[in-house]
């Protein structure tokens, strides 16, 4: 099980004085910090934990919770410890660390995983659901599908251009829906919790705002990134029309026997629609999008979009991640897009962060400035755009294992000295400032 963004709630009046420098967040706004099991726990071979795809991918040679009582005891302690400290756990069932033996049977490309995932989800609901009331089934299915099964730059490292991502996504959507229904039928009445899926999306701006082709390309980028998952789950059980038509046309031109985008049956569409109790979004960055004709004979998820991404050179880039252009206003636009497209849902920002490269200064003044600007944009989203935002969780609580970037990309609110076996933790300035925001339930002028 991947953990547990921690969320504390705080109360203070919802007054907006039109000054994002000093406005309060709504009452009961949930503040948190997120982590993921594989990125912080270590112990890849501890206590009978089996290997997962990241253990294999990183050549370290780590079903954890499910088969293993030590795993259950461990997460019992984590959850109880959080609650004892008045922190509300929000639990993600799967954050990239698929057991290797499932991958060996096809992983997310195999339809059999739907039942397995549902059984695992039921186990977690049954075991921890007396104390956990906010659940996320899958973290960032886009990343798993596009980077894990298409590009192969994340575990499990599969490169099946033009088919792998679509198939993996198809099964993740069905697995999520199955788990949601299990919760709804078997646990909701007694436990009273909520279940969703953590989606990620960049915001897409047309590269040339006056070019209709770029405007359409930016819309397609949103469709292929966010709506790919959100449209079936939040709307009608099916993929966005623009994805279906594009992929079908390109597949035909490439002489594929049928569209490379799998289809849901009508029963599956009924099963998938409306299977989220709130909208969970992870936001990091924005891209400018340019139209680009796809004339290639090679199937590719990325070329199917006929849209290429460009980073605006004027945007600052986080020192620890070359992909992370820091664009706080992109988050406001993304939130508005979710509100308008998905019928004004309750939204939680379940990840947002900025990385520093090594050596990372404890006085991360510039990074805190980005957080501060982001919180200002969020206030505008809440009070000006009327977005129903209920929480914000920083990625991440601690410096951790940043997947293919290893330990060099530091996202933590707390610095971790990885050279010292005791792994001491020291707050960055951002941690201290964020604590003030939480205590105050808003920014204060001196921020
Ligand atoms: C993932 C995290 C990751 C973070 C920063 C998110 O896509 O959920 O696991 O560390 O981005 O790259």
Image (cartoon, rainbow, N blue to C red):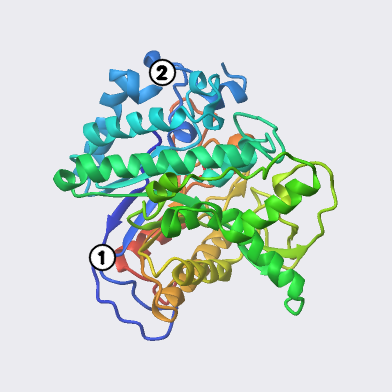
Nearer the observer, 435 or 37: 37
Nearer the observer, 80 or 345: 345
Residue occupied by mark 2 = 49
Nearer the observer, 433 or 395: 395
Residue reaching furthest top? Answer: 48
- Identify whether 237 is placed above or below 113: below
CA gap between label 2 and label 1 equals: 38 Å
Q: Is mark 2 within 8 Å of ligand 1?
A: no
Answer left or right for 127 relative to 143: left
Residue reaching furthest bottom? Answer: 17
Quarter of the image that includes the C terminus = bottom left
Residue shown at the point (45%, 48%) measured from the top left: 266
Q: Earlier in the sequence, mark 2 or mark 1?
A: 1
**Alpha-carbon neighbours of circle 2 within 10 Å: few (<14), some, or many (≥20)?**
many
Quarter of the image that includes the N terminus = top left
Residue shown at the point (22%, 45%) measured from the top left: 85
**Which SS class for mark 2?**
loop
- Identify whether 71 is placed above or below 375: above
Residue occupied by mark 1 = 28
Residue 423 shows in this picture = no
Nearer the observer, 385 or 343: 343
Q: Position of residue 51 (x, y in %)?
A: 49, 18
**Which SS class for mark 1?**
loop
Q: Is mark 1 within 8 Å of ligand 1?
A: no
Q: Check residue 401 in the rendering and tell me which mark sits there, or answer none.
A: none
Residue reaching furthest left? Answer: 190
């Amino acid at each position: 099980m991947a953990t547990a963004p921690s969320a504390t709630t705080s109360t203070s009046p919802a007054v907006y004085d039109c000054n994002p420098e000093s406005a309060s967040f709504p009452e009961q706004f949930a503040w948190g910090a997120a982590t993921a099991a594989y990125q912080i726990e270590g112990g890849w071979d501890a206590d009978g934990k089996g290997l997962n795809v990241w253990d294999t991918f990183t050549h370290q040679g780590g079903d954890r919770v499910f088969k293993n009582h030590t795993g259950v005891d461990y997460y019992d302690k984590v959850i109880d410890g959080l609650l004892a400290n008045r922190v509300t756990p929000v639990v993600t069932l799967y954050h990239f660390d698929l057991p290797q033996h499932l991958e060996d049977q096809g992983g997310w490309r195999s339809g059999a995983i739907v039942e397995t995932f549902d059984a695992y989800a039921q186990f977690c609901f049954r075991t921890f659901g007396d104390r956990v009331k906010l659940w996320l089934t899958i973290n960032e299915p886009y990343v798993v599908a596009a980077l894990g099964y298409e590009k192969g730059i994340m575990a499990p490292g599969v490169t099946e251009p033009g088919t792998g991502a679509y198939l993996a996504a198809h099964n993740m959507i069905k697995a999520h829906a199955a788990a949601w229904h299990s919760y709804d039928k078997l646990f909701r009445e007694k436990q009273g919790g909520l279940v969703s899926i953590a989606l990620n999306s960049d915001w897409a701006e047309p590269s040339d705002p006056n070019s209709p082709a770029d405007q359409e390309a930016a819309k397609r980028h949103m469709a292929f990134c966010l709506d790919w998952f959100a449209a079936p789950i939040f709307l009608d059980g099916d993929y966005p029309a623009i994805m279906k038509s594009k992929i079908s046309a390109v597949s035909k031109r490439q002489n594929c026997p049928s569209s490379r985008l799998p289809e849901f049956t009508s029963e599956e569409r009924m099963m998938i629609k409306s299977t989220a109790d709130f909208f969970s979004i992870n936001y990091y960055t924005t891209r400018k999008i340019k139209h680009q004709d796809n004339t290639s004979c090679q199937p590719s998820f990325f070329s199917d979009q006929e849209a290429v991404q460009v980073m605006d050179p004027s945007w600052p880039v986080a020192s620890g991640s070359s992909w992370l252009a820091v664009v706080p206003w992109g988050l406001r636009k993304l939130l508005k897009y979710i509100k308008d497209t998905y019928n004004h849902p309750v939204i939680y920002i379940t990840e947002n962060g900025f990385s520093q490269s090594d050596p990372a200064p404890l006085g991360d003044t510039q990074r805190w400035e980005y957080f501060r600007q982001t919180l200002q944009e969020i206030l505008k989203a809440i009070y000006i755009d009327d977005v129903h935002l209920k929480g914000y969780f920083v990625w991440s609580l601690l410096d951790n294992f940043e997947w293919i970037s290893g330990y060099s990309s530091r996202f933590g609110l707390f610095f971790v000295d990885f050279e010292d076996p005791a792994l001491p933790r020291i707050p960055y300035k951002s941690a201290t400032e964020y604590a003030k925001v939480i205590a105050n339930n808003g920014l204060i002028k001196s921020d």
